[in-house]
Image (cartoon, grey):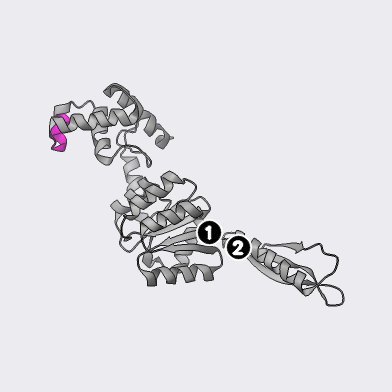
Amino acid sequence: MWWEISPLFGAAGEIRTGVQLRGRSLDPEVGGTDTLSTMIELQLDTPTPAAAERGVALAQQVQIQDRVRLILIDPDAISRHALSDALRADGRFVVIAQAEGSVEGVELALHYKPALVVIANAVPNMDSVSATERITSSAPEIRVVLLSATRELELEMSAVRAGASGFIQKDAGVKAIARSLVLVAAGESVISREMTHHLVDRLRRTPEDGSGLRPVKSPLTDREWEILDLICSGSSTRDMADNLFLSTETVNSHVKRILRKLGVHSRNEAVQAAGRLRSGILV
């Protein structure tokens, strides 16, 4: 949505105590032709230029509230400032803060609670996936988008598991990045074509009982899910050790952690808990 701000004039041409806002959607799906108008007028006894200025200030406040508030985290100052300037020029975003490192970026995100946090995948001090998990676990209402300079499917999968709502290539271009950010802010998710093909392929090869599927948000690590999958298949401790090239003691330690994290007391109960976690994926 963009807003056109203009003063209101009286019959004799004097400035009245307010401004008029006209807006239309920038979304090409809407067609970009529908307009809506509203009037903000300060109720004062005497119309003055100062009152009109107050009306303009109020209109500008409305304009800012209509934009997507976001924080940028990127160690590359040139890239960060260039993207910030481009998003501001786009008109649909307000960049409320920038950070070079992820530790500072996470602190800013949890303090200001923006709609979006955009993280470059090469941030220092804390990797982008860990930063994503910190933000989404502490403030689920914040949507995180990763910008990557490389095409790494494993990184994208890890980011999604950590709670990211989008994964965008840095070389996609400013217009494409802005379009994707708008979609994420509206509640949608943006992933690569490679990721889409991978997920579809995995879903096709998944048994009807859901074995092998893993929820995006889970208390278990990848290794613990590997062991839980083997438990669900009926493997013994020795079978799991041989399959994963681990000692039986290590497998038993993993099993104990799995039971504790799932809040169960036996392997049979762990199988049932795994089924409950996967049921939401299959629906």
Q: Which residues are magenta?
A: 239-246
Hey, which quadrant is residue 104 in on the image?
A: bottom left
- Left or right: residue 53 versus residue 149 is right
Residue at the bottom extreme of this rendering = 13
Q: Position of residue 251 (x, y in %)?
A: 18, 32
Question: Is residue 59 in view from this perspective?
Answer: yes
- Which residue occupies 42% across, 49% down? 135
Q: Position of residue 6 (x, y in %)?
A: 72, 72
**Secondary structure at numbered mark 1:** strand
First in sequence: mark 2 vs mark 1: 2
**Nearer to the camera, 29 or 180:** 180
- Left or right: residue 231 versus residue 133 is left
- Which residue occupies 74% across, 67% down? 20
Is mark 2 in CB contact (under 8 Å) with mark 1? no
In magenta segment, residue 225: no
> Label 2 vs label 1: CA separation?
9 Å
In magenta segment, residue 245: yes
Query: What is the number of the mark on residue 69?
Result: 1
Residue type for callout 2: Ile
Q: Position of residue 110 (x, y in %)?
A: 46, 51
According to the image, label 2 marks what residue? 64
**Nearer to the camera, 20 or 49:** 49
Packing grade of label 1 (10 A; few <14, some 14-19, many >=20) is many
